[in-house]
């Protein structure tokens, strides 16, 4: 079993079956038929890695000391090519997030913030012709898991309305000076590096946004927020008081930061979908195992239609959501990420669908974990299984990376544009 219990009440014969190995067996049955041979091989290796790592995880400790283990195998992210780690692409990263969540859903959220949200801007920087060896070193530090990264977009007064940020940048001869505050900076209280957005002119954020890579040692102050649902991740209130950034660390200047912010949102949302699916699959599979083995009134509780039909409904919805996410990632890989000539229509479609799928999958993870707890009964709210941890993580999925209404707002805007077609 994956957790150290304060007091064990779960029956031994059930507990021994609630293993990561069995979670993966049932996941394989549901997921692998949707994958190519290459993706199955990649997933098999990843699952073996997870089973090897599992005994080393101390769930009373923060997730960060596990990052180097991920880094050694190229698992801090798999969207972009780094060193010789193959295969890679958006679909590989969704599979990574999904299966790492089965191992440890908090490790997965920490990894996503460091490996995707903070490291992706370095890949964008090089794709756009950047050449700094300092940025290359930071990319290597983040991808190897030796250092921790975070991203600062959200501010105390600007959450969903993130573009109208108040963090001010001021040009100086050899760089830029940041003044402002960010909140909800995932990994922030532990981070070595911060990708931070600011603007030269608060009345023209789109035209003046700057994206920089900032080292903690330049004066970034962080104060940890208490967020009960993910206690092993350090999420911070981040204060930038006259933090000077040398010009080599500016990733996108003079309004280009706005383009990077939006380019970054699609892989961010798709990555979050992988995590949400992983939380959902793990919770549902634990329920499938438990309800098959737990007897009441002389039979397995799964045989009662109240339990069995509910799990059948959840499985149907989760299979549909998973197939949507994999399809969106496939289109992104084929027509955007690896395309010789990017398809603007596909880019637009994936941007819209990433909001639709983020909206559906994050909500679904909450619905599934809530229902799973109702169907499993009391044991699921104890520390005898990991279900309550997964339920806690599912609470934040809808807020992180843009709250539910903002995804719907983006989808609604697309609907309004159809008027121009009429
Ligand atoms: C655990 C956690 C980790 C996070 N990690 C990061 C991180 O690493 N970096 C980072 O920059 N941010 C991070 N965030 C911030 C997250 O992206 C924001 O919380 C989110 O964008 C919403 O902003 P807000 O919380 O200020 O809510 P608000 O923007 O104040 O929204 C409150 C409510 O109003 C609704 N609302 C707002 N505007 C509209 C509208 N136009 N139409 C309809 N409804 C609307 C929202 O949907 C929401 O329900 C994290 C948040 C959490 C909880």
Image: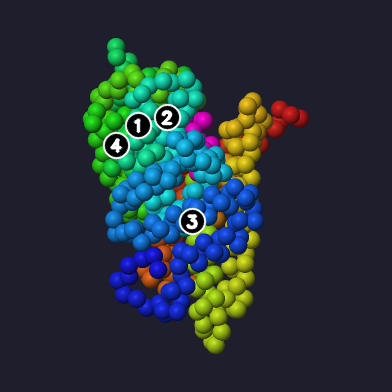
Mark with earlier residue (3, 1): 3
Q: Does the magenta stretch include residue 346?
A: no
Magenta part of the chain: 261-271
Res. 61 in view: yes
Going 55% across and 39% down the picture, which residue do you hit? 89
The residue that mark 3 highlights is 47
Q: Distance between the residues labelled 4 and 2?
A: 15 Å
The residue that mark 2 highlights is 122
Mark with earlier residue (3, 2): 3
Q: Position of residue 346 (x, y in %)?
A: 65, 33
Which element is circle 3 on? Answer: helix
Mark with earlier residue (4, 3): 3
The residue that mark 4 highlights is 192
Disc 3 + disc 1, Cβ < 8 Å: no
Quadrant, the C terminus: top right
Q: Where is residue 259 in the image (x, y as percent from the top left)?
A: 50, 25
Which element is circle 4 on? Answer: loop
């Amino acid at each position: 079993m994956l957790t150290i219990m304060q007091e064990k009440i779960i029956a031994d014969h059930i507990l021994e079956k609630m293993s990561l190995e069995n979670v993966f067996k049932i996941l394989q049955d549901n997921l692998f038929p949707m994958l190519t041979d290459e993706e199955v091989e990649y997933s098999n290796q990843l699952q073996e890695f997870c089973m090897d790592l599992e005994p080393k995880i101390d769930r009373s400790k923060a997730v960060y000391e596990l990052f180097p283990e991920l880094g050694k195998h190229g698992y801090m992210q798999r969207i972009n090519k780094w060193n010789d780690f193959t295969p890679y692409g958006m679909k590989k990263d969704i599979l990574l997030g999904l299966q790492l969540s089965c191992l440890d859903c908090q490790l997965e959220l920490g990894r996503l913030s460091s490996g995707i949200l903070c490291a992706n801007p370095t890949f964008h920087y090089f794709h756009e012709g950047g050449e700094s060896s300092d940025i290359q070193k930071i990319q290597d530090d983040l991808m190897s898991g030796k250092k921790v990264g975070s991203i600062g977009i959200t501010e105390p007064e600007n959450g969903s309305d993130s573009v109208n940020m108040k963090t001010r940048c001021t040009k100086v001869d050899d760089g830029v000076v940041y003044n402002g505050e960010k909140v909800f900076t995932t990994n922030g209280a532990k981070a070595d590096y911060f990708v931070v957005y600011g603007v030269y002119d608060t009345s023209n954020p789109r035209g003046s946004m700057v994206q920089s890579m900032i080292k903690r040692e330049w004066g970034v102050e962080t104060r940890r927020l208490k967020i009960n649902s993910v206690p092993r991740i350090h999420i911070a209130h981040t204060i930038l008081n006259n933090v000077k950034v040398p010009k080599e660390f500016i990733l996108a200047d003079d309004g280009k930061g706005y383009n990077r912010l939006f380019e970054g949102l699609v892989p961010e949302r798709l990555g979050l979908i992988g995590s949400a699916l992983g939380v959902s699959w793990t919770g549902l599979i634990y329920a499938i195992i438990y309800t098959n083995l737990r007897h009441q009134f002389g039979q397995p509780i799964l045989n009662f239609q109240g339990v069995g039909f509910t799990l059948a409904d959840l499985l149907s919805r989760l299979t549909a959501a998973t197939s949507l996410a994999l399809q969106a990632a496939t289109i992104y890989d084929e027509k955007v990420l690896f395309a010789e000539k990017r398809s603007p229509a596909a880019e637009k479609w994936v941007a819209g669908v990433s909001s639709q799928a983020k909206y559906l999958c994050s909500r679904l993870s909450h619905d599934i974990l809530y229902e799973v707890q109702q169907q499993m009964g009391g044991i699921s709210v104890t520390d005898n299984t990991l279900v309550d941890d997964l339920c806690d993580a599912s609470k934040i999925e809808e807020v992180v990376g843009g709250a539910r209404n903002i995804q719907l707002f983006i989808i609604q805007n697309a609907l309004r544009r159809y008027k121009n077609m009429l």
